[in-house]
Amino acid sequence: MATVQNIEIPDSAARSTLAADELQDAVGDKMVLNMGPSHPATHGVLRILLELDGEVITKADPDVGYLHRGDEKIAENMTYTQFIPYTDRLDYLAPLANNVAYALAVEKALGIHDKLPPRCQYIRVMCCELARISAHLLGLGAFAMDVGAVTVFLLTFTEREKIYNLAESASGARLTTTYTRIGGLMRDIPPTWCDQVRQFLKEFAVALAEVEVLLTRNRIWVDRLRDLAVISKEMAIDCGLSGPNLRGSGIEWDLRKNQPYLCYKDLQFDIPTGSVGDCYDRYLVRMEEMRQSMRILEQCVNKIPGGAENKTHEPVNVADGKVVLPPKQGVMTKMEELIHQFMLVTEGMNVPSGEVYFGHENPKGELGFYICSKGGGVPYRLKIRSPSFINLSILGELMPGAMVSDVPVILGSIDFVMGESDR
């Protein structure tokens, strides 16, 4: 049975004196505010310990790890192909791009990254750029909603649904696609897929222009973002930022241009950069990146080898039965194909001993995979360089001096995903 303890309640005069004494003791003290890990403005299970002097932040300490699943350790206990679905769960706003990044890393270890069929390269690039638009749309929609622009959120989600339809048409899945395979793709795109992409680009151009009208010169939006959380070039480099957060500080670095892979070297596009490095610049960079992605997609649908219907039967997988599963008809009729199928499914492809690293320009920044192999079909070690984790490390430098109401704005401008950060 619980015991209730009587408490002596002072009279009104005594209470006034007590309150005054407490206030006197509190003068100059700072308050610690625990924001998250379940807070709508943190966009995931991010916890931030804020030290406040009134409404002004004097110290910020981000606390990550609430979504940690041990992906890197899991990779050591399964074949390279079996790990592909786990990459969907990193930046789950851009699973198509995650698949491509991981496949390119393994292909580099196998020494076949430069032997991919041209049609496969173009399809992978289209998948990556659609994923970039999709991730930026959600980031922008949630960012705008945090500042009070709910209409933008509805517009961006409408366009993302169209991208999900394209992903479903190509892979059969909307969110966790697992479309890429090591050495190629799960299957070729449907004959009407390029026409669907063209239709999406026409509709998306109108929606993007409408979002720009609503935000770019909106006085409330500009006042909330401009000159807030400025990241200098030196700070961006010192903290290891990448992607739009790095380019927003005026550094022209994009792996698609500086270290080109797939067919990016054959495509024309520009790298948008900011001039100040504030929240407004990071917003503008992402808006322009979506336009450049549209430009890349238009070139791809017009230049894809074999055309939309692949009338010339261009392959989408490397011609290596020890890497890619052989055709089912061959498995059922030929002993060699049956053996290759059995070995690939049970033991995985034989990756030579050695270490490789591949960095991919993902929507959030450089998604890198470091693979250490001792031979066989299972990696000895696998390390994921997640851009969200590294980009979050700068919060302790950005937030001091800002107001509590600026926290959602700063987080929205950084644009992170906790599934990628914690892995």
Image (tube, rainbow, N blue to C red):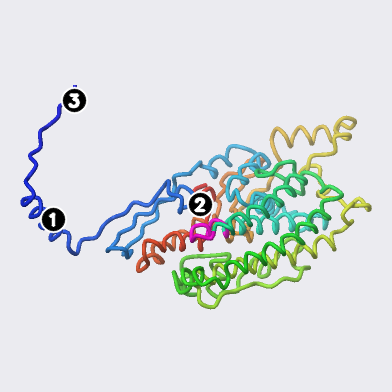
- Reading the chain from its start, which is encountered first: label 1 or label 3? 3
**How crowded is the residue under tag 1: few (<14 C-alpha within 10 Å), some, or many (20+)?**
few
Task: Please state which of residues 395 and 107 is positioned toward the viewer in this rendering.
Answer: 395
What is the residue that sits farthest to the top in this orientation? 1
Q: Is residue 363 left or right of residue 305?
A: left
Per the image, the residue denoted by label 3 is 2
Q: Is residue 279 positioned above or below 332 on the image?
A: below
**How crowded is the residue under tag 3: few (<14 C-alpha within 10 Å), some, or many (20+)?**
few
Estimate the x, y position of residue 90 in percent, counting from the top left.
58, 48
Which residue is pictured at 66% across the width and 59% down the height? 133
Q: Is residue 407 positioned above or below 377 on the image?
A: below
Q: Amino acid at mark 3?
A: Ala
Estimate the x, y position of residue 392 in percent, counting from the top left.
46, 59
Estimate the x, y position of residue 372 in percent, counting from the top left.
59, 49
Asked if residue 142 lies in the magenta stretch, the reply is: yes
Which residue is pictured at 69% across the width and 67% down the height? 291
Q: Amino acid at mark 1?
A: Glu
Estimate the x, y position of residue 93 in percent, counting from the top left.
61, 51
Q: Secondary structure at mark 1?
A: helix
Specify whether residue 39 is in view: yes
What range is drawn magenta here? Answer: 140-149
Q: Secondary structure at mark 2?
A: helix
Per the image, the residue denoted by label 1 is 22
* Rendering quarter of residue 205: bottom right
Task: Please state which of residues 344 and 291 is positioned toward the viewer in this rendering.
Answer: 291
Task: Please state which of residues 69 and 165 is positioned toward the viewer in this rendering.
Answer: 165
- Reading the chain from its start, which is encountered first: label 1 or label 2? 1
Disc number placed over residue 421 in the picture, else none: 2
